[in-house]
Amino acid sequence: MDLQITSRPGYSAAACTLSAGESVKAEGGAMMAMSANVTIQTSTGGGMLKGLRRAVLGGESFFLNTFTAEGGPGKITFAPVLPGDIVPWNLSGETVYLQSGAYLAAGPDIDVDSKWGGARTFFGGEGLFMLRCTGTGPLLVASYGAIETMDLAAGERYVVDTGHLVGWSEGVAFSVRKVGGWKSTLLSGEGLVVDLTGPGRVYLQTRSQEAFLGWLIPKLPRDTSSS
């Protein structure tokens, strides 16, 4: 599969050129356009229980779509819901973790499932589950805003706001904590942060959905009429 990321970093799209018979899996609603000879099959991606875990607990679609080029090469373009960037993460029999909403598409040999995150992700405001992606092939990761890549050396530590963390490789240890005391946590506008410890790769996004909603919601008109 040949990949080309266009219109980056603000409104990225991923153009995938498939050989005859080649397939790619994608999140529901991710397809923007495709060749007429590309077919689509919809499934739960591993059974109903796995689909439920991914949808209810991981924040992704219950169904996954598989696109296949039939009778010759084909092209399909994917685009995420939010404006931002897309990065291809090429896996070689390894495991990486993505926060909810970061998964866009992947090669057919990559398994996408949810993984228990415990209180670490709960207190990070990202839900009780994260997505675990394992296998070999390209993984398309989407962000809100541009994507920054960080490669941590063994033992190297870095602190990231929870709303800006997109994904990390299996070797990276992480724990969520308050930015300071409760006063700082509630009043500083920073909230909670993630302590990351290498070795491994980390992807960050330059914008935060939570911060944007915190700015937007107070500005929305309210219905002041009494019932």
Image (cartoon, rainbow, N blue to C red):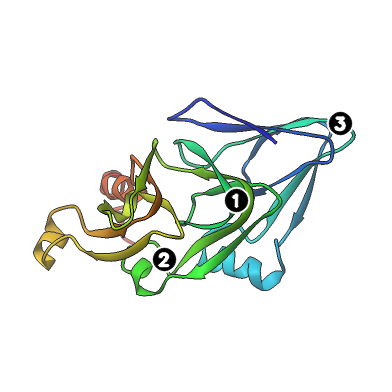
Residue visible at 47% across and 41% down?
82
- Mark 2 and mark 3: span between their CA atoms? 42 Å
Q: CA distance from mark 3 to mark 1?
A: 27 Å
Residue 55 is situated, as x and y percent measured from the top left of the image, at 58, 63
At x 53%, y 61%, the residue is: 132
Q: Is residue 194 visible?
A: yes
Is 188 on the left or on the right of 85, as rendered? left
- Point out the image quarter for the N terminus: top right
Residue 117 is situated, as x and y percent measured from the top left of the image, at 43, 70
Q: Does residue 125 show up?
A: no
Residue 219 vs residue 90, the one in the foreground: 90
Tag nearer the camera, 2 or 1: 1
Does 207 appear above or below 94? above
Question: Which comes sooner in the sequence, label 3 or label 1?
Answer: 3
The numbered mark at residue 92 is: 1
- Label 1 sits on a secondary structure element that is strand
Residue 62's place in the image compared with 69, above or below, is below
Q: Earlier in the sequence, mark 2 or mark 3?
A: 3
Residue picked out by circle 2: 127
The amino acid pointed to by label 1 is: Ser
- Residue toward you, 98 or 35: 98
The mark nearer the N terminus, 2 or 1, is 1
Q: For the residue marked with disc 3, what is the amino acid?
A: Gly
Residue designated by label 3? 72
Task: Residue 179: give x, y in percent of width and height.
Answer: 17, 60
- Closer to the observer: label 3 or label 1? 1
Q: Position of residue 28 (x, y in %)?
A: 64, 50
Inspect the image, locate mark 2, and give the three-letter code of the amino acid beneath it: Gly
Q: Left of 186 or right of it: where is 10?
A: right
- The quarter of the image holding the C terminus is bottom left
